[in-house]
Amino acid sequence: MQHSRAPSSLWGVALPAQLASPFAASMPALAQPLTPYRVLDVDGSVIGELPSLADEDFRALLRWMIFGRELDRRALQLQRQGRITVWGPMSGQEATQAGLGFALDAQDLLFPSYREAITLCIQGLDLADLLAYYRGLYWLADPAATGVYPIQIVIGDQTLHAVGAGLGFALQDLPRVGVAVIGDGATSEGDFHEALNFAGVLHARSVIFVQNNGWAISMPTAGQTASPTIAQKALGYGIPGILVDGNDPLAVFASSRWALDHARAGEGPVLVEALTYRLGAHTTADDPRRYQPAEEIEAWRQRDPLVRMRRFLEHAGLWSPSDADAASADALARIDAAFARAEAIATPSFERVVGSTFAMPTAPLREQLRQLEAEA
């Protein structure tokens, strides 16, 4: 499908019907689809091959998506109360995050941006540590223990970090993958292209996962690239590119699992583009009403990923209204307990901040530490 360059038509049209999997074994390695891969239609009906998951895994996927929706609501409240500094809303993108999180292995390394709370928690990050970060207390979690590296605020830099990790895994022949999660805006940064070039040439065990939610703050995707898709950009670097419906958690899981297995087996890196939509603001410092068309937002609300997954489970006899109530109550209890722990965490010492940057602090850092201690 050749997308229109107009922002409203790019994100306002109905997604196309199911096509053959873009990662089928019979497809040429570098074939680039122009339509997103799907397993579930917008009404929750199955239109593709279901991934091999147990019934409880299907249910858990929706529970994690509900957790993300409730976390988004609570975090917005906390920010308005001045109890956290800022928040990047993720409503509408829960399927993308949960699908990727379920596909990751425990030994993989995740290099995120600021809109992947569900994926981080699935991978093993303590929500209290994440909320403490948003309180302004520095990144407290140990990446070696969690597999999650600190949130990257500099747009696109994590692509280089994931490729560096993937290159290390390739050199050591380790069945691990470095995964960078970025937004569509990061694909306009030089780091993104440099990372893909190095990854392709050096056969890094890396996956670059793009949450294309249609907007880089107020800049629509059509204003960032002339190519119909971001996934197509993989062609220029000699690597596979996958385009997937990011509001379909089962399609995201299947696509991500294939990409991760491909990289893990030493077959080279993969670029994944998940088409989704940001229903809320870029961050709590943003007013999306100034640029997002109301009719566009409403059209995407009709494709709510939580509704799609719930209908699929209901059709399969795996979900009921009481399950939904229990999932929401459990999520809120976990979130509130985590925030209580986060509020109890003391401000880390200067030594902790400096000590977690380098194995041995450099001379400039030692001098800065001395100055901070003198002024404290």
Image: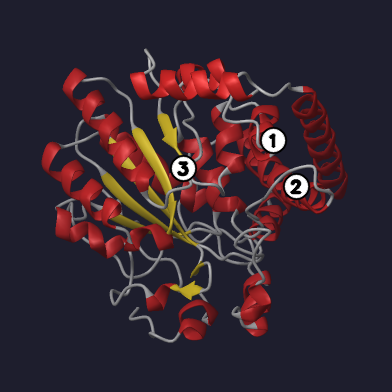
The CA span between labels 1 and 2 is 9 Å
Instruction: Evaluate whether residue 107 shows in this view.
Output: no
Residue highlighted by disc 3: 152
- In the rendered view, would you say 163 is above or below 85? above
Q: Are marks 1 and 2 in contact (CB under 8 Å)?
A: yes
Q: Residues within 10 Å of mark 1 (few under 14, many from 20)?
A: many
Locate residue 299, reporting x and y percent. 64, 78
Closer-to-camera residue (248/161): 161
- In the rendered view, would you say 255 is above or below 91? above
- Judged from the image, the secondary structure of the residue bearing numbered disc 3 is loop
- In the rendered view, would you say 79 is above or below 18? above
**Quarter of the image containing the N terminus?**
bottom left
The CA span between labels 1 and 3 is 15 Å
Closer-to-camera residue (86/99): 86
Locate residue 325, reporting x and y percent. 87, 45
- Judged from the image, the secondary structure of the residue bearing numbered disc 2 is helix
Q: Earlier in the sequence, mark 1 or mark 2?
A: 2
Q: Which mark is residue 75?
A: 2
**Quarter of the image containing the C terminus?**
top right
Q: Is residue 296 left or right of residue 332?
A: left
Q: Which mark is residue 131?
A: 1
Q: Earlier in the sequence, mark 1 or mark 3?
A: 1
